[in-house]
Each structure stands twice: as C-alpha cells, then as structure tokens.
Image: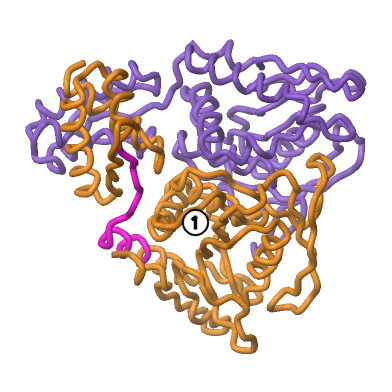
Chain colours: A orange, B purple
Amino acid sequence: MKRSDRLVAMTHYVLDRPRELVSLPFLSEKYEAAKSSISEDLGILNKMFQKEGIGYLESVSGAAGGVKYIPAFSKEYSHQFVNQLCERLEDPARLLPGGYLFMSDILGEPGTVRNIGRLFASVFSDKEIDAVMTVATKGIPLAYAVAAYLNVPVVIVRRDPKVTEGSTVSINYVSGSTKKIQTMVLTKRSLAEGSKVCIIDDFMKAGGTINGMKNLLTEFNAEVAGIGVLAEAEDEEEDRVVDDYVSLVQIISVDDRDTKIEVHEGNLLSRIE
Amino acid sequence: MKRSDRLVAMTHYVLDRPRELVSLPFLSEKYEAAKSSISEDLGILNKMFQKEGIGYLESVSGAAGGVKYIPAFSKEYSHQFVNQLCERLEDPARLLPGGYLFMSDILGEPGTVRNIGRLFASVFSDKEIDAVMTVATKGIPLAYAVAAYLNVPVVIVRRDPKVTEGSTVSINYVSGSTKKIQTMVLTKRSLAEGSKVCIIDDFMKAGGTINGMKNLLTEFNAEVAGIGVLAEAEDEEEDRVVDDYVSLVQIISVDDRDTKIEVHEGNLLSRIE
C-alpha cells in the first residue's frame, strides 16, 4: 500500500481505538509495509495529532510493542471550548422558574457532548480506569462520551429498579440540597468487584447524588478513580459533601429578578497542561 | 504543509464532521495548499474510506463547493457485526426471570454502541433528518450514536416531567404489551416545529412506546423520517402498531425452561447495499 493511502487508513484506525495497544507487527501486516515504514508513518501521525490538539501517540516498546492513541485536548482548545460554553450558559433565555438553567439543548448536541467527553478524558488520561459510572438520565450522554475516549464500558445507576435487568444492589442516600432520602440502584452484574470507576454527572450542587454513587461503589468493593461534573453550583447553606472533583464550569449566580446569570470556568482547566 | 501531514490532519477533520459541507477554499487555506492538491488529497481520502468500509466523500460542486463525509458501513462489515451481535445475544446466561434478556453489558460498550449508530446512520443516510428522538433511559446511548453520525441533535422524551426543563407537552399512550395507559413528556423548546425526526429505541415489542413518540411528534407538527430499533421481539397476542421500521436483530424465541434463546438478523441488513 502507498504511504498516502496508509496514512489515511491508519489515522482512522488509530483514532477509532483510543488507549488500545495497536502493535507494529499488526499494522505492518494489515497495511502491507515494512515495520520501518510503519514506524515513520506513526511518527507523522503523532506529530499531526499534537499539532491539531487532539492528543498524541504513546509508544510501547518490546517485541509486541506499538502505540496507543491518548486523546488529550490542547490547553488552547480547552480554554476556547470552556469559555464558549460559559458564554452560552449566561444567555438569560436559559432561565427557568426556580432559578434553574435550561441546558438540554447543549446536552443534545453530539459534537458538544463529544468535546466535553474529550476534555474529561484528557484530565483522567493518566489514571487507571475500568468503567465510567453515571446516574440516569442527563449524565448518560456525557458518560458515554468520556467512556468512548477512555475506551471502557459505561455503568448506569438508576433511581428505580427495572424488572428487565436482573438482581440489583440498592442504597439509600440523602439528597444534599433537599435533605430527602432517596434510593439508587445498580444491577449486580453490570460492575465487576474491585473496578476502578470514574463518576460523571451533568450537575452538582451539594454533591449528595455523587456521594450516593460513591457509597454504591463501596458495596461493589470498587474504587473511585475520578469524579467529573459538567456544571457545579454554589450552595451557601450546605457544606459540600464531595471535595475531590473536576468541573468544566461553575455557575456563580442565577439572578431570577434581574435575569442575569454568571458562569465561570471550573477547576478542570487548571489541570490541563 | 506536506501532503503526508495534510492527509493525517484532513482525515481527522473530515471524520469529525459527518454530513457537514467542508469547502475546498477553506481546506486550501487551513492546510496551506493549492486547491488542486487538496482535490487530489480528497480523492485519496474517498478511496480509502470506501476501502476501509466506513463511508465515502460526497462532492458538492460550485464556487463554495467541497465535500461531505457520509458515514456508511460496507455490506460485508454490517453482516459481520450483526451476526456477532446475534451470537452474543443467544448466550443462555442472558436469560432473566420473566423471559427478559440482559443486554446492559452490550449497551454499555461505547465501541459497540458507536457501531450500532453507524449502521442506523448508513440506512438513513439518504433521508433528510433534523433530529434524533428517543425515550429515557436505554435508548439514549443509541440515539446519541446515531445522531453523531447524522450530525444532528438528540431530543429525549421522558416518562416523568422534570422541574428543571421548563414547559412541556405531554401525551397519553397505551403500552402495546401491557395495555396500560402511560404518559410521555417532551420539553417544548427541545424540538422546533416541522422538524424531520428519526426515532431510535433499544427494544420494540408491540410498538406502543414508538407509537407514543409518533403521536408526540404530531403535537409538534413534526414528521417521522425513520424508525430504528436495536431489537424487535415477536408478540403473538398483539398486532404490531408500528410497521415501517428498521431493526438490527430479531428475538425469535426465549425459552425459559430449556434456557434457549434464538436471535436472527433484523430487516436492516436487507437495506444496506
């Protein structure tokens, strides 16, 4: 195969398999080229991925060595994306009764959701992660986006058990903002014991829901490997029950009367080099 | 920029923007090359995308002309993927009390979900579609996967209204299998009047839920542009209330006593050329 043909095919192949080891002998056979030529190709891919700000290729040495594509957004692009998001969220038309913000349109855009996933995956790229966990409903697309770039499965916690899922483990937790006791349910066979889990959700106020997921994980002898939320909101009356988390944006204030919303960047940007 | 560098960058750029017009002048400026060179590059991309079975580039002529990447799985790959899925679903360990099948593990795999999305997008690639609609919870990842390849937003119908979403439109519908009256709710501002909508769900028996979504669409003066379900099941006691749909697999029989499951390919494969 010609180099130009190979570069196109290999770019797609590698991008489609983040964090997966793609071995040199395999590529050499698949694209009918000497290992030395494939090595040169991978050098071009690595250089261009970095230039385009979408990550890099990690080299794995040894006889069965090869590369892993590690998705990582560049600092520049991350800032640009988060700032755009803040601006969009500050649109007064988003104000709903009760001081809530309408965000379903943003969460409905596959491209935006994919970029959010790429950002979280960039931050968690050096962690060992076996699964991404979220609670139905709004966190689901974000969890899949993160999981796609980490190349691990998604586990969905529900607030109501479903008959079509088999036996479950359930816990009670106290919602941070309303102080109500609620239930969370996870199908037994959906998570292996001892898994390292990244928790993703769309919104965090006092952190009760995320704390509930953490408690659920201890029932599975599983570990929290990271916590990511799209938006965090200040809650003056509460002490936050979750502290080690990454947020994309911070909702500083929602003024119902003056229809003014203030949204700042979250702590995620400070973790991207 | 050198051709080899350009090919890597352009492959990523185009794959990231399915069905979006990428203009020749734009590419020429972005990658600092003459339009004639970019044209040749696009020819290589088109040839290799087809060879890899992931789609093709559609040419758009005129002064602001360029290309659109149309994701489309090759017939060969589609058959292979669907047959593997059937085999996995026939595993007796999936049997749950009541003759239900455990599928959450499969729906939790981002790679599998992405491929399912790519298959549906291939079938609907010649349709004009403005949005993908599904009902919470299990259809959500599938809907996002389809929407990503069609490059349109996702609209999520709920069974319970949420205060954080603003005003809603709700309808009642009769569940096909249980004959119970149920409610479906969609936030008013999540779908524009007159939209052409593709409905996606994980499972269809009599079709009551999908019929409910069709009724909801008429409330928005919106049109059904296509219906796709991952798995359809036979239901002898019912006449199906939905007829024009595409299914990936067909659950022929689930034998609780002999723990035997029979799953065949659905009608989707016959629509892929």
Q: Which residues are magenta?
A: A67-82
Q: Quadrant of residue B199?
A: top right
| Quarter occupied by the N terminus of chain B | top left
The one nearer the camera, A138 or B63, is A138
Tally the numbered discs: 1
Left or right placement of residue A4 versus residue B113 in this view: left
Is the residue A246 above or below the residue B12 in the image? below
In the image, is residue A20 part of the stretch drawn in magenta? no
Question: Regarding mark 1 in the picture, which secondary structure is present there?
Answer: helix
The one nearer the camera, B186 or B10, is B10
Residue B204 percent location from the top left of the image: 75, 29
Is the residue B243 above or below the residue B171 in the image? above
Q: Residues within 10 Å of mark 1 (few under 14, many from 20)?
A: some
Residue B103 percent location from the top left of the image: 70, 34
Q: Identify the subunit bearing mark 1.
A: A
The one nearer the camera, B111 or A61, is A61
Residue situated furthest front in the rendering: A63
Is the residue A122 above or below the residue A271 in the image? above
Is the residue B268 above or below the residue B205 in the image? above
> Residue at point 56% right, 55% down?
A196
Which residue is disc 1 drawn over?
A106
Residue B243 percent location from the top left of the image: 73, 20
In the image, is residue A72 part of the stretch drawn in magenta? yes
> Residue at point 22% right, 28% down?
A7
